[in-house]
Image (spheres, coloured by chain):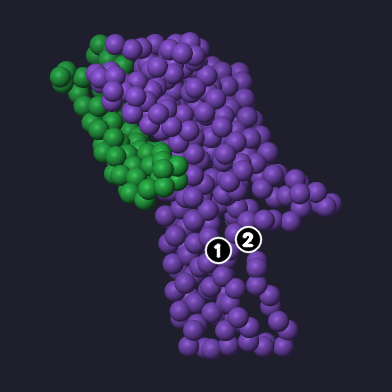
Chain colours: A purple, B green
Amino acid sequence: MSHVVLAGGEEHHFVPPSPADFQLPPVFGHSVLFTKPFFLLVLGGLIVVVFFVMASRNASVVPSRLQFLGELGYNFTRNTIARDVIGSKDFMKFVPYLTALFFFLLVNNYFALIPFVQFPTLSLIGFVYALGAISWFVYNGSGVRRHGFLGYLKLQTMPAGIGPGMLLLIAPLEFLSNILVRPVTLTLRLWANLFAGHILLLLFAIGAEYLIVESGNPAYIPVGIMSFLLGMAVSFLEILVLALQAYIFTLLTTLYISGAVAEEH
Amino acid sequence: MSQPPQEPGEQRRTADPWQAVSYLVTGVGLYGLVGWLLDEWLGTSFLLPVGIVLGAALGVYLIYIRFRSPDHQ
C-alpha cells in the first residue's frame, strides 16, 4: 500500500495508486529479482506443467476426473484455437506452444483475483514483452522455415494484385505492420488490460479504506462503502477480462502463425 | 497477413480487425515520418501533413487490397 497511516488519528491526504505500486520489494535479501512477481511467474509455470503432466499420466480410455479436465483444456487450444485457425494440415506442430501459452497466461492472469496473492504478474511490461518476443519468433520463424527468408518477406510485404508503383509505396507499410507493429500491439494489449484492471481494483480498495477509516468525516462512510461495492463489481468484470485477454493473445498468435505458413495462391 | 488458405470444406477465416487498425496507424506513422524527414531536408513545412494524409490513404488502400474477397478484380 502506498499511503501512510499516521498515529493519533490526524487527517492526512489520500495517495492514489500509481505505477510505483507495481514495484514490489524483494522477498528476501536485496536483489531486484526475487520479488513477488518473479515467484508468482515461476509458480504459474509450475502449476501449468504439473497439472498437465498429472492429467496425462496413466491415461486410460475411460478418463479420471483430472484427465478429463486436462483433455478439456487441451482440446480447447488444439481444436478451437489451433486447428480451426491454422487448418488441419499444419496445426499440430504449434499446439504445444499454444496450449502452454494459453494456460500460462490464464493462470498468471487469475493471480490478480486470488485472495492474498492479488497481483497480475503480466502487469509488468517486461514479462509481457518477453512473451510477445517468443510469439514473434514462432510466427516469423515458422514462416521463414516454410517459405525461405526471401519468400517469406515477399509473402508478408507484397499482396497480390497491385502494380509495381503502388507496390513500392505499400511494401514498407506492410513490412512495418506485419513485422514490427504486431508484437508491440500484442504486448501492449495484454499489458494495458492487466495494468488498468489492477489499478482500478487498487483505487477502489484504497479509496474505500481511506473514506471509511481515515478521512475523519462520517459523511464519507456510505461513499466508502459504495467504493468497496464498486470494487467488487470490477472484480467480477475482471473475471471475464482476464480470461478474454489470455484467449485473445493466444488467438492472435495463432492467426499470425496461420498467415505466415499459409500457401500462396 | 497473406490471403487466407482456401481449404476445401473449411470455413473462411475471419479477417482480423486489429490488422486494419495497424495498417492505418503504421501508414500514418511511416509516411508522416517520411514527410517530416523530407521537410527537414528540404526546409519546407507542408510535406509533413502531406505525408500523413498520404499514409492514411495508403493504409485505407492496403486494407481494401488485403481484405477484399479474392474473386474481385
* Residue at image point 54% right, 79% down: A211
Q: Position of residue A51 (x, y in %)?
A: 60, 31
Q: Position of residue A149 (x, y in %)?
A: 49, 14
Front in this rendered view, residue A150 or A244: A150
Under mark 2, the amino acid is Asp
Which chain is home to disc 1?
A
Front in this rendered view, residue A142 or A193: A142
**Residue B52 visible, this angle:** no
Left or right of A108 on screen, residue B45: left
A15 to A168, vertically: above or below: below
B50 to B8, vertically: above or below: below
Quadrant assignment, res B47:
top left
Front in this rendered view, residue A27 or A72: A27
* Residue at image point 34% right, 24% down: A168
| Circles 1, 2 touching at the beta carbon (< 8 Å) | yes
Looking at the image, the residue that sits furthest to the front is: B43
Q: Earlier in the sequence, mark 1 or mark 2?
A: 2
* Residue at image point 57% right, 66% down: A17
Which chain is home to disc 2?
A
Q: Quadrant of the C terminus of chain A?
A: top left
What is the C-alpha distance between the residues marked 1 and 2? 9 Å
Residue behind mark 1: A202
Determine which of the numbered discs, if any, sits on residue A21 in the image. 2
Number of on-image labels: 2
A205 to A263, vertically: above or below: below
Q: Position of residue B56 (x, y in %)?
A: 29, 41
Looking at the image, the residue that sits furthest to the right is: A29
Q: Position of residue A197 (x, y in %)?
A: 49, 56
SS assignment at label 2: helix
